Amino acid sequence: MTDTIFALATAPGRSAVAVVRVSGPATLSTVKALCGSAPSPRLAALRTLRHEGVALDEALVLRFEGPASYTGEDSAEFHVHGGRAVVESLLSALSDLGLRLAEPGEFTRRAFENGKLDLAQAEGVADLIDAETEAQRRQALGQLGGALSQRYDRWRDLLVQSQAMLEAAVDFPDEDLPEAVAERARPALRTLKAELDLALADVARGRRVRDGFRIALIGAPNAGKSTLLNGLTEREAAIVTDTPGTTRDVIEVPLVLGGYKVLLADTAGIRDTSDAIEAEGVRRARAWAEDADLRLWVVDGFHVKHRVELEDAVRPGDWLVLNKVDIAQTLTLDEAERWARGEGLEVVRLSARSASALDDLRSRLAAAVADALSGADFPAATCLRHAERLREAQSYLARALSDAGLEVELAAEDVRLAARALEKITGRVDPEDVLGRVFSTFCIGK
């Protein structure tokens, strides 16, 4: 028989109300043991909770009968006062009654195992809990609502139909089948392959909404990167001094721009150095910038040496930030801007100490982030696990459509494997270790 589990579902610590959840076959007997009588299903009732004759708290009690519950089994919630002593006394009482403390994600795992959610939707639950921005909330809620699962299921159904045609040609070669039945599967497979190609090309967008759009501030020492970071984030996140090489490591600061999560990084000044510690900082700066979604090359507009500093490092789409324009010569800035635009760079002129200039840059960055991450369609993959399975399905389809797949038996097997790869995303088939990895990331109580 399945254990009956319990956990605190709200954040630990002092609060007005704390919620303790229970799920499993002993739910009803547990409610009766603590409350004396069980409230009707789905009707909140005020009860005095007692254990071994001692009153624990006045609580609002809710009971749900399976399968019409979150987990698909009998469950209950105790809404108690949020003091530490009250919560601890209730958790201790539940343990004394033979219930087991839930593992991370165990309530949602039971919902998955009881068919209330598929695996992609379950991951949407975790993402919704972790959502810090409006964009993350929308993406997670869409995934929880089945937007991803519906797309995967449609692709899988197309594969199953194509597989049926291919296997019919293999199993019944002498039957009165429509002419070239196996060939009829190929147009649908080509269309699906094209959709998977587009989905994989869009993988980065879903992951960047989920994990954050990465913006690197990079450039020579004393160009004003740390001052710019502090100005954009509106707090003293980085130390600012006149000494070159003050920043030795990458300083990441999360913020929200245009409704999207952004990771803004101040990096060590790029220069040749014999100092081992500073050299390691320069290496880390280059590595972080290489993987950044947007790179802002910050240049001292008063001592601009753009060709020396940037010529071998910039790439189209980078931004050139000409800093300290309040003390720079206009002709020098004009020359730098002409060179930058010829290299395909966006150009920003500012003084990092000017509030209005920082507001303008913040607005431009917000527009750039929104342009990069918004899209008409819901992204087809929001995490690495989805992307890996999509690539697996794509490779099997490519082989089925290639010269190697001309043998109908081989093509049918590749199509079957592609369908199985998609089934792993939603959890129709999934090994135990994958389930363990997915649900171990959840908080206890969910």
Image (spheres, grey):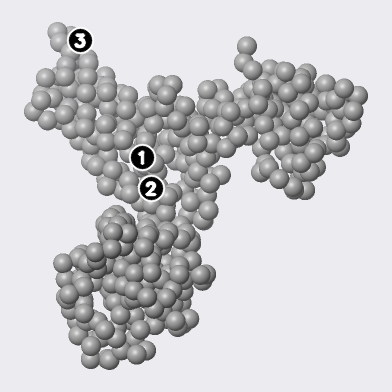
Which residue reaches farthest right? 53
- Per the image, the residue denoted by label 3 is 171
Where is 42 relative to 224, above or below? above
Where is 247 relative to 63, above or below? below
Residue 59: x, y in percent? Answer: 83, 37
Question: 10 Å neighbourhood of mark 1: few (<14), some, or many (≥20)?
Answer: few
Q: Is residue 411 toward the left or the right of residue 328 in the image?
A: left
Question: What secondary structure is found at the residue carrying circle 3?
Answer: helix
Closer to the N terminus: mark 1 or mark 3?
A: 3
Task: Identify residue type, mark 2.
Answer: Arg
- The residue drawn where x is 48% and y is 81% is 355
Quadrant that contains the C terminus: top right
Quadrant that contains the N terminus: top right
Residue 289: tell me if it is visible: no
- Per the image, the residue denoted by label 1 is 384
Q: Quadrant of residue 29?
A: top right
Question: 10 Å neighbourhood of mark 3: few (<14), some, or many (≥20)?
Answer: few
Q: Nearer the viewer, residue 82 or 201?
A: 82
Q: Is residue 39 toward the left or the right of residue 426 in the image?
A: right
- Per the image, the residue denoted by label 2 is 207
Question: 10 Å neighbourhood of mark 2: few (<14), some, or many (≥20)?
Answer: some
Task: Identify residue type, mark 3.
Answer: Asp
Residue 78: x, y in percent? Answer: 76, 34
Residue 439: x, y in percent? Answer: 50, 31
Q: Disc 1 and disc 3: Cα gap in Å?
A: 38 Å
Judged by depth in the image, the label closer to the viewer, 2 or 3, is 2
Task: Identify residue type, mark 1.
Answer: Leu
Where is 90 relative to 209, above or below? above
Pointer 2 with pointer 3, Cβ within 8 A: no
